[in-house]
Image (cartoon, helix red, strand yellow):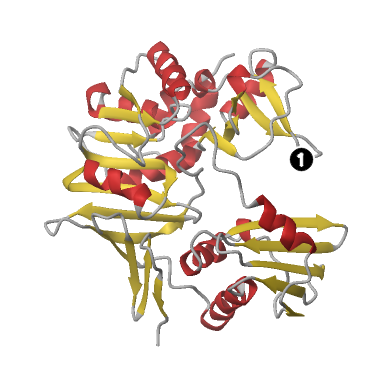
Amino acid sequence: MVWQMKARALAHEVADPDSRWLAPVAKTARHTLIPRWWDVDGSGHWVLRDGPSDPEAWEEAAYADRSLVTRVGALHADHARPGDRPEGLPTSSATPPSLVVRMLRHGRLGDGLSLLDLGTGAGGLAAYACHRLGDPCVTSLDVDPYLVSAAGERLASMGYHPRLITADATEHVPGTYDRIVSTVALAPGAGLRAVFRALEEGGRLATTLARTSLIITGWKDWTGDIVGRVERDMAGFVLTRSGDDYPPALAELFALARGAEGDERGTGRYPVVDVAKAWELRSMLEVTAPGVEVDYETGGRTRTAYLVHPDGSWARATAEWTGPPEVHQGGPRRLWNALERIRNRLTAEGALPLLGAKVRVTPDGVCHLSRGRWRASLGARQLHVLPSG
């Protein structure tokens, strides 16, 4: 495989000609970091791809600006056998190079500043950062010992030797840093507290918030809080985890949502949407009802969306194509009504108050969002949302 030309083309695709990140992308042998990965076949099942056995497909995948899933549930592609069909959600991936570059830019890195790469994964961000800043400035952390070990060996083969740490960032982050760039989604509250403590005063954080596509950035200022904004940019990262896999989804509640009549039945105003892919809607729904989980199914022209919440609430909306959906809901809150209020606002105002909102993260990890008269707090025991005028 002659990878240098592919890497150079990728670099010019994801970085401007005068960008400081052009050379790091062009000089990184990304295929070395991702010898095996998971793909999805035509029936929606995970299927193993092995790079060395198909160099042409390996080169095409590694030097495309795309995410490559390396771990599904508890099974890493490196440990899989042909024919394995894991089930569950991706738990690690190689982030698209363009998104890595964007997150690094949001981090405002500079010469001599210490960087924590939170979420080692395949090692792509660590490689770019080592090339740009030098090994002594870069620390990379992941909860998974194998990911840290494998990335360390592969980075070393390229001549990069960042400090590598295996730790649960939701519990403790060793050391303190001038910059923290996270390519895993951090949960407000408990999920942000340890990261908050690891940021030096005057330092900068760039991360996404769990179950949203919101990128928040901020400086740890003289008040002791992290003060910044929701960037006018969006990203989707896997959630932080503390064990081999994520806790079981709300399977019983999803099963109930699929077949129950519910406490309330009616007709929705808007077409059924795949909420997980409607990033801004999904983000605002999480701000409104933290912890909500979503699913979506299609069959012919029929579309069905499901919303469930740990408090026992659920909603099912089914429609033919873009027709008005039949909605069933149960539990203490009406989740579909909450989604429709968000869609009403988007239709009436043309935008939601999220992107560009001010952010203040307090030492308890709670994220306080504000824009005009609109306020929301994420991560506190009780969620408070105040609508704008």
* Above or below, 260 relative to 338: above
Q: Residue at x 27, y 59 (%)?
A: 228
Location of residue 276 in the rendering, given as x and y in whole percent from the top left corner: 61, 56
Residue farthest left in this picture: 222
Q: Quadrant of the C terminus?
A: bottom left
Q: Is residue 16 visible?
A: no
Location of residue 63 in the rendering, given as x and y in whole percent from the top left corner: 56, 28
Residue farthest bottom in this picture: 389
Which amino acid, by three-letter code, is at mark 1? Gly
Mark 1 element type: loop
Residue farthest right in this picture: 300
* Above or below, 120 relative to 256: above
Q: Which residue is mark 1?
A: 44
387 lies left or right of 368 = right
22 lies left or right of 9 = left
Which of 210 and 228 lies nearest the eye of the viewer? 210
Q: Is residue 361 visible?
A: yes
Location of residue 306 in the rendering, given as x and y in whole percent from the top left corner: 69, 62
Which of 111 and 289 lies nearest the eye of the viewer? 289
298 lies left or right of 337 = right
Location of residue 32 in the rendering, given as x and y in whole percent from the top left corner: 51, 18
Q: Quadrant of the N terminus?
A: top right
Q: Residue at x 56, y 60 (%)?
A: 292
Q: Residue at x 59, y 73 (%)?
A: 332
Count residues near mark 1 (Cα–Cα under 10 Å), then give few for <14, some for 14-19, many for 20+.
few
Q: Residue 75 occupies which quadrant of the picture?
A: top right
254 lies left or right of 78 = right
* Above or below, 30 relative to 255: above
